[in-house]
Amino acid sequence: MESITSSKLFTTRQGTILLGVIAAVIAAIALIVYLNHYRNSVKGNPTVSVLVAQKLIQKGTPGDLIRQSSGYYKATAIPKAQVKTGAIADPSTLAGQVALADIAPSQQLTATDFGPTTSSVADSLPPNMRAVVVPLGSPQSVGGQIGAGNHVDVWSSFNHVNRLLFQNMYVLGLSGSNVTLRATPRQAGLLIYASQNGQMWLVLRPAIGTIQKNPAVIGIGNLATGH
C-alpha cells in the first residue's frame, strides 16, 4: 500500500508540485543556515584595513616618497586578530617620517618602522654602507630633478667610453651641485675615482617596476652601428 502511494506521489501532477515545494523549502532553510553562519563568522572575525608593503622599502626611504608614489604599499583588509600593534592605516601619517629599517614585501607598515626625519645622514646608514658626495653639473644630475629617496643608475665617461658603473643606487640628498649617494666602501672609492678622472652622469630610475640589466659599455663603435 505504501509503495502504491509513493508511486502515485511521483507520477501525479500534484505529487510533482509537492516535491518541488519540499525541495524549495529545503533550499531556503539551507540558505538561511549558511547566511547565519556567514554573519556569525564575520562578526567573530572583523577585518581592519592597514598598509602592507608591496615591495622592499629600504631603510632611509622618506615617508613622503612612499605615500606619494604608487607601488610601495597597498591598503589591505587584515583579520583584526592578525593586525600588528601600531599598524598604519592612513598614508598621511608617513609625512615627515623616514624608514628606520628595511621593510619586506607583504609586511605590515607599523609606527615603529618609521621615525622623524633627521638632519644626520649617518642615522639612515646601515653598518656596511657609506655616504659619498659626488659633485655634478645640472645635466649630470638629471637637471636637478632628483632628490632624497630616489634611485639612480651611475654612468662614467672616461677616455671617450661610457660605462654603466652601478645600478639602483639610493640618493640620500641633493645640495646644489652635490649629490650624496649611499654606497659600499668599494663603490664609494670607485665613484670618487670616476669623478676625479672623468665625468659622471646620473640616470633617474622609475619608482616601481625597475629591471636590472648587465652593465653596458658604450663607445664610438656603438654610435657607428647604432647598437
Image (cartoon, helix red, strand yellow):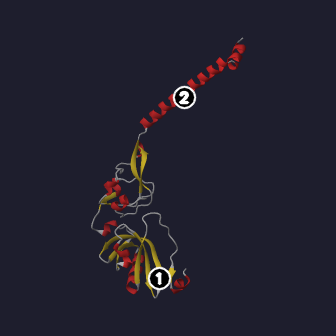
Q: Position of residue 72 (x, y in %)?
A: 41, 59
Q: Is residue 131 above or below residue 24?
A: below
Quadrant of the rendered image containing residue 226:
bottom right
Q: Is residue 221 found left or right of 11 in the rendered image?
A: left
- Coordinates of residue 54 in the picture (x, y in percent): 44, 57
Residue 53 image-quadrant placement: bottom left
Which of the two labelled residues, at mark 1 and mark 2, occupies the earlier sequence position?
Answer: 2
- Residue 96, position in %: x, y? 29, 60
Using the numbered discs, state the Cα–Cα distance from disc 1 to disc 2 in whole angstroms.
Answer: 72 Å
For badge 2, the amino acid type reads Ala
Q: Amino acid at mark 1?
A: Asn
Instruction: Please give left or right for residue 93 compared with residue 35 in the image.
Output: left
* Residue of label 1: 162
Q: Is residue 4 above or below residue 95?
A: above
Residue 59 x %, y %? 38, 63
**What quarter of the picture does the C terminus occupy?**
bottom right
Q: Residue under circle 2?
A: 30
Quarter location, residue 166: bottom left
Front residue of 34/78: it is: 34
